[in-house]
Every structure is written in structure tokens, then in C-alpha cells.
């Protein structure tokens, strides 16, 4: 009996369901097809319902975990759900062992990929959370996000690849062993690159500097713009970009001015030797008064330091309670202006390089006795 010759009423319908199609009754194929469509329709509804509940919970109490979980669940692929539905429907029919094994393997691989995507979504959410916190409270965390994200994704997808190969029947033990031997060879050939990679990880975890810090390395200085896997890039004061290998950078002595909470300032000046002692004694208190009149400073000391070649030298030390260089220069400029004004009012002269030549004149008798006869004539 052919498909077109079937009687689709009463007993004929029941007999038609028993017709064998590819080794299974037609009724069994219909049951399997019904399961496929039922599961394919049900899984998106479950996904949508879970997402709605998580979003509603996050909106009620501001729970970030619920919001992130909804974001992760929303990344479920429809193609994976159809594969799961096809696998469930195939349980209702008898398939050949090869087809059944192939379908099971494909479904398992799809599920592993979906789990890996969920894990990557969770990793991205965690990194985004760290990045959001870095913008508000922890600026140093911004440097670590890129490095941790790269390392996390490499580890995640390496593990997923090994599990997929194991599910497909490959001997991953031998593969891991061969990768270990090959890894040693690659590590020896790429030791400089790996050194920079581990140095970048060290920078990310130890945080000797972060993006935005002003640093000095040897005789080069500038603001950190980018910390990568191999290099760190610094924008110099003159405008050009300085590129440092991470390994070389960690071997250097780094001066981080962004971490400076206050700035110690030492400066000196000299006055004329002709300044009377009484006026010299008034200079340290006068300097202290001028420095303490400035906002955001802490006076330390002012002393008559030494006798210079052409000046009486004074030394002053104070602290600017701010790391900003322009702020320090504004304060020092105000102190200098006030020193000039106050010294002029008290007629105290600033010293400048001078040289005094003393000439001794001989008595007239000695000059005549010492003059040659030819000169006297």
C-alpha cells in the first residue's frame, strides 16, 4: 500500500499509523515530531519566563545578581534549544546506532558551547562590574580588567575545547601530553614574549602604576596611557608616545608622582654681606610668616645656612599638601613675589655674584728706592 492509497478514516487511519517509514511506524514519527515542536516551543517560553522574573526581582530590590543572571540567561541560543528539542524527539523513534550517536554527540557539543557562552557571559558581567567600580572608587582596577579578561577567556575556551574533543572521542590525555611538550618548546622560543606577558600580569596584580599615573623611568617621564600584554605606553610631556616592554619596565626604577600625597619643597636665597646682623635675624621669622600665609602648605624650617662666596645663604623647607605640580609652582611664585616685596620694604638686598679687588699702595720712599736708575733719569 502506498501513501496515496491509504484510507484516512476509521480503521484505515489506525492502520495507516502502523505503516513503517524508515524502520519506524508512522505514528511513532508523528509522536517524535510532536515532541520536537513541543520542546522547541516550551524552552523559549521557559527562558522568557525566567528572564522576566529575574528582571522583576532586580527592579524591586535592586539586586545586581538577578540583573546579571537575567543578562546571562538571555544569551541562550535558539539553535541550541532546537537541537535539544530534536534530541528529545529522536528518543521516541528507533534510529540506527551511528545516527543516534552522531545526534547525541552534536547535542552534547552544542550544550557544551552553550555552557561556555554562559560562563563567558558571567565573566563579562564580572569584568564589567569591576570596570564600573573602577570608574568610581578603584581606579587601579581599570588596568587589570583587560589582562584578566584575556586570561579568563583563554582558560575558559581551552577547557571547553578539551571537553568537546573528549566528547567526540579523541584521546585528550595524549593531546594534553603532546601540548605540554610542545608548550615547553614554544616557551623556550618565545621566552621574551612570555616574559612581557607575565610582567603585564604582575603589573595588573601588583599595580606599581595604573592608567593616568605620571611616572618617571630613568630619564623619561610622562603619563601612562595604556598597559597591554606586551608593552606599556606613556605620553611624554613633549607630546610623543614612549613605548616600554613590560619586562624591561619592571626591571627599572619607577618614580610614581601620582601616588605622592604631599610635595617637599626646598629652596634657598642669598642676601648681601653688607646686611646688618639685626636684619639677618629677622629673615627666618619673616620667611615663616610668608610661607604660612599660603593656603595648603605646612612650614618646616628656615635657617641661615652658610657663608657663600658672595652672599649670606638661607635655606627654607616647606610641604605642599597636594601632588599637583602647577599648584606647587603657584605657591612658590607667590612666596617669591612676597619675599621681593618685603625685602624691598626693609631695604634688604638680594645677593648676586660679585668680586672685590683690594689694591695696596706702596709708600713714596719705597717706590723711589725701588725704581731703577734708568727710570729715574
Image (tube, rainbow, N blue to C red):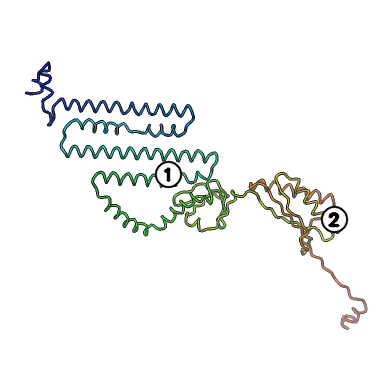
Position of 249 relative to 151 (above/below) = below
Position of 118 relative to 196 (above/below) = above
Q: Residue 79 appears at what percent x and percent y?
A: 29, 32
Q: Residue 158 appears at what percent x and percent y?
A: 34, 47
**How many numbered dots are placed on residues in this image?**
2
Residue occupying the far left of the picture: 1
Secondary element under disc 1, as helix, strand or loop, is helix
> Which dot, 2 or 1, sits closer to the camera?
1
Viewport quadrant of the C terminus? bottom right
Residue placed under numbered mark 1 in the picture: 149
Position of 178 relative to 92 (above/below) = below
- Please name the residue shown 44% across and 52% down the image: 230
> Which of the 4 image quadrants contains residue 51?
top left
Q: Is residue 29 left or right of residue 320?
A: left
- The disc, 2 or 1, on the residue closer to the chain's N-terminal end is 1
Q: Do the residues labelled 2 and 1 touch (CB within 8 Å)?
A: no
- Please name the residue shown 49% across and 54% down the image: 244
Position of 9 relative to 320 (above/below) = above
> Which of the 4 image quadrants contains residue 46?
top left
Mark 2 burial class by Cα count in 10 Å: few <14, some 14-19, many 20+ = few
Mark 1 burial class by Cα count in 10 Å: few <14, some 14-19, many 20+ = some
Residue occupying the far top of the picture: 9
User: Foreground residue, 317 or 345?
Assistant: 317
Residue placed under numbered mark 2 in the picture: 279
Give the spatial CA distance, label 2 vs label 1. Answer: 67 Å
Amino acid at each position: 500500500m502506498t501513501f496515496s492509497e491509504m484510507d484516512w478514516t476509521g480503521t484505515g487511519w489506525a492502520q495507516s499509523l502502523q505503516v513503517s517509514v524508515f524502520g519506524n511506524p508512522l505514528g511513532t514519527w508523528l509522536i517524535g515530531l510532536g515532541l520536537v515542536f513541543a520542546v522547541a516551543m516550551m524552552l523559549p517560553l521557559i527562558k522568557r519566563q525566567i528572564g522576566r522574573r529575574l528582571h522583576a526581582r532586580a527592579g524591586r530590590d535592586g539586586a545586581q545578581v538577578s540583573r546579571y543572571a537575567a543578562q546571562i540567561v538571555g544569551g541562550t541560543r535558539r539553535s541550541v534549544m532546537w537541537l535539544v528539542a530534536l534530541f528529545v524527539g529522536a528518543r521516541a523513534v528507533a534510529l540506527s546506532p551511528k545516527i543516534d550517536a552522531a545526534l547525541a554527540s552534536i547535542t552534547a557539543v552544542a550544550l557544551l558551547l552553550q555552557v561556555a557562552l554562559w560562563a563567558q557571559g558571567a565573566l563579562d558581567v564580572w569584568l564589567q562590574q569591576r570596570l564600573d567600580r573602577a570608574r568610581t572608587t578603584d581606579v587601579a582596577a581599570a588596568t587589570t580588567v583587560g589582562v584578566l579578561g584575556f586570561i579568563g577567556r583563554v582558560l575558559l575556551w581551552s577547557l571547553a575545547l578539551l571537553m568537546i574533543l573528549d566528547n567526540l572521542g579523541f584521546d585528550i590525555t595524549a593531546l594534553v601530553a603532546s601540548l605540554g611538550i610542545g608548550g615547553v618548546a614554544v616557551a623556550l622560543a618565545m621566552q621574551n614574549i612570555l616574559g612581557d606577558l607575565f610582567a603585564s600580569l604582575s603589573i595588573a596584580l601588583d599595580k606599581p602604576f595604573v592608567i593616568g599615573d605620571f611616572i618617571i623611568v630613568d630619564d623619561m617621564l610622562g603619563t601612562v596611557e595604556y598597559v597591554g600584554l606586551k608593552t606599556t605606553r606613556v605620553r611624554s610631556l613633549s607630546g610623543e608616545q614612549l613605548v616600554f616592554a613590560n619586562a624591561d619596565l619592571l626591571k627599572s626604577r619607577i618614580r610614581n608622582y601620582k601616588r605622592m600625597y604631599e610635595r617637599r619643597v626646598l629652596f634657598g636665597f642669598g642676601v648681601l654681606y653688607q646686611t646688618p646682623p639685626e636684619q639677618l635675624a629677622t629673615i627666618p621669622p619673616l620667611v615663616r610668616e610668608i610661607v604660612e600665609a599660603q593656603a595648603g602648605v605646612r612650614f618646616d624650617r628656615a635657617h641661615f645656612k652658610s657663608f657663600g662666596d658672595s652672599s649670606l645663604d638661607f635655606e627654607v623647607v616647606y610641604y605642599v599638601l597636594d601632588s599637583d605640580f602647577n599648584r606647587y609652582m603657584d605657591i612658590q611664585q607667590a612666596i617669591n613675589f612676597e619675599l621681593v616685596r618685603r625685602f624691598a620694604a626693609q631695604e634688604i638686598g638680594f645677593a648676586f655674584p660679585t668680586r672685590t679687588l683690594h689694591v695696596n699702595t706702596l709708600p713714596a720712599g719705597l717706590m723711589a728706592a725701588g725704581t731703577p736708575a734708568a727710570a729715574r733719569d
